[in-house]
């Protein structure tokens, strides 16, 4: 029988498990605290009886990612991790340092099925969802390895978080718990390409996280060419969902907009973007796109990005340009994973 990963359990689920093996409820709280102190074995849980530790070892495990590869930027110290999962699959995380603290960008899936044409993560499609434990452990391993305390999380790594809804919600609740990692919801951003029905579900959760929408083009027909999700969840339906989300949560939405030369950086795009979001509680985040070898998109030049930003500001929108970090280590998620998988394939062919 497959063992239960304790790092994937909420406090309530852990309490139910402990009750099922005939132990007192307070033991669950002890175990939960030990897990998030970073123990890797039950023998380290020194205030538990030997009998209980043996029961846990027989039925349970503590999730444990392995650092397969690590790259450190010589420019700004950004760290990119390639983690190996227990089944051999690979995922990526990026640890970035800002004046306000350390931020980690985590993955939520192995691969992605959304098919966005400018993204390396979706090349090869979706392999599987990550468990809550596998998402949490990206943070714990990065903290332990770097020695840096992580205060902010962005769910913008490999995968579409709302396509792995149940595990992501569980992750959010565990990571926020005071006996877990204790990271406040207001320090967490979740990015989606626009899974409309799940945005309504997320609104009902009413968690004070920041919802980030990958928009990338304000014209539906053009957006559909680079983001196939628009064929299933069209832009007008997405806008309805965002208005409903704002009405329930009152939380400002971040609009992610990758700047692609000649594709979405025109005056017409700026005007249409302003028309879409004028009067809404949103912030536009302009992102100089990362160049991906297999894609033919090129990022807008600096002058055009500045002009685009100034136009949006004149049209009444709040807007910033995202600072580029880790440019010397290909910090865009999916690139390191893909290069290692390609290397492994070549080794198999040679063998």
Image: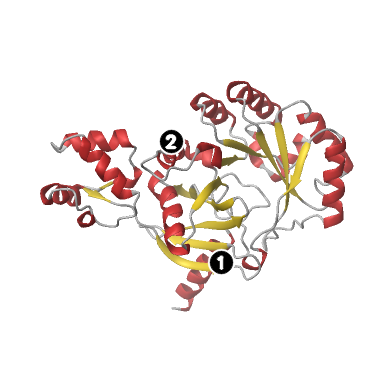
Residue at 62% over, 67% down: 329
Viewer-side residue, 301 vs 37: 37
Instruction: State whether residue 127 is above or below residue 174.
Output: below
Closer to the chain start, of discs 1 and 2, is 2
Residue at 30% over, 33% down: 12
Q: Among all residues in the image, which is located at the extreme bottom?
A: 350
**For residue 146, side relative to residue 320 (left or right):** left
Instruction: Return the residue at label 1.
Output: 339
Instruction: Return the residue at label 2.
Output: 166
- Count of numbered marks: 2
Viewer-side residue, 218 vs 178: 178
Q: Do the residues labelled 1 and 2 touch (CB within 8 Å)?
A: no
Question: x and y percent of residue 331 in the render?
Answer: 61, 61
Question: x and y percent of residue 346 in the render?
Answer: 51, 73
Q: Residue 62 carries which label?
A: none
Question: x and y percent of residue 225 in the render?
Answer: 72, 43
User: Mark 1: which secondary structure?
Assistant: helix
User: Mark 2: which secondary structure?
Assistant: helix
Question: x and y percent of residue 226 in the render?
Answer: 71, 45
Instruction: State whether residue 238 is above or below residue 268.
Output: above
């Amino acid at each position: 029988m497959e063992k239960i990963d304790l790092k994937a359990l909420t406090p309530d689920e852990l309490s139910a498990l402990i009750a099922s093996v005939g132990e007192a409820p307070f033991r669950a709280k002890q175990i939960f605290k030990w897990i998030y102190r970073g123990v890797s074995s039950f023998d380290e849980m020194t205030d538990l009886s030997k009998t209980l530790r043996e029961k846990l070892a027989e039925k349970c495990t503590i999730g444990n990612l392995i650092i397969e590869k690590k790259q450190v930027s010589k420019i700004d110290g950004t760290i990119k991790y390639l983690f190996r999962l227990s089944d051999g699959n690979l995922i990526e995380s990026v640890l970035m340092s800002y004046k306000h603290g350390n931020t980690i960008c985590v993955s939520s899936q192995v691969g992605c099925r959304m098919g966005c044409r400018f993204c390396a993560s979706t090349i090869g499609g979706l392999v599987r969802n990550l468990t809550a434990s596998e998402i949490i452990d990206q943070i714990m391993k990065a903290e332990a390895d770097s020695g840096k305390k992580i205060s902010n999380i962005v769910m913008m790594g490999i995968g579409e978080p709302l396509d792995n809804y149940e595990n992501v919600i569980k992750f959010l609740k565990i990571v926020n718990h005071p006996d877990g990692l204790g990271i406040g919801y207001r320090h967490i951003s979740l990015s989606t390409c626009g899974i409309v029905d799940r945005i309504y579900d997320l609104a009902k959760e009413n968690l004070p996280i920041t919802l980030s929408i990958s928009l990338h083009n304000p014209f539906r027909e053009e957006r559909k060419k680079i983001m196939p999700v628009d064929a299933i969840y069209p832009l007008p339906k997405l806008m309805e969902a965002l208005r409903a989300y704002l009405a329930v949560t009152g939380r400002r939405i971040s609009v992610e907009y990758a700047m692609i030369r000649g594709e979405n950086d025109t005056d017409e795009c700026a005007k249409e973007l302003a028309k879409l979001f004028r009067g809404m509680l949103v912030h536009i985040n302009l992102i100089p796109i990362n160049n991906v070898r297999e894609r033919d998109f090129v990022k807008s030049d600096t002058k055009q990005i500045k002009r685009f930003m100034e136009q949006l500001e004149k049209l009444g929108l709040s807007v910033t340009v995202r600072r580029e970090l880790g440019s010397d280590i290909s910090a865009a998620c999916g690139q390191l994973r893909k290069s290692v998988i390609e290397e492994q394939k070549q080794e198999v062919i040679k063998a």
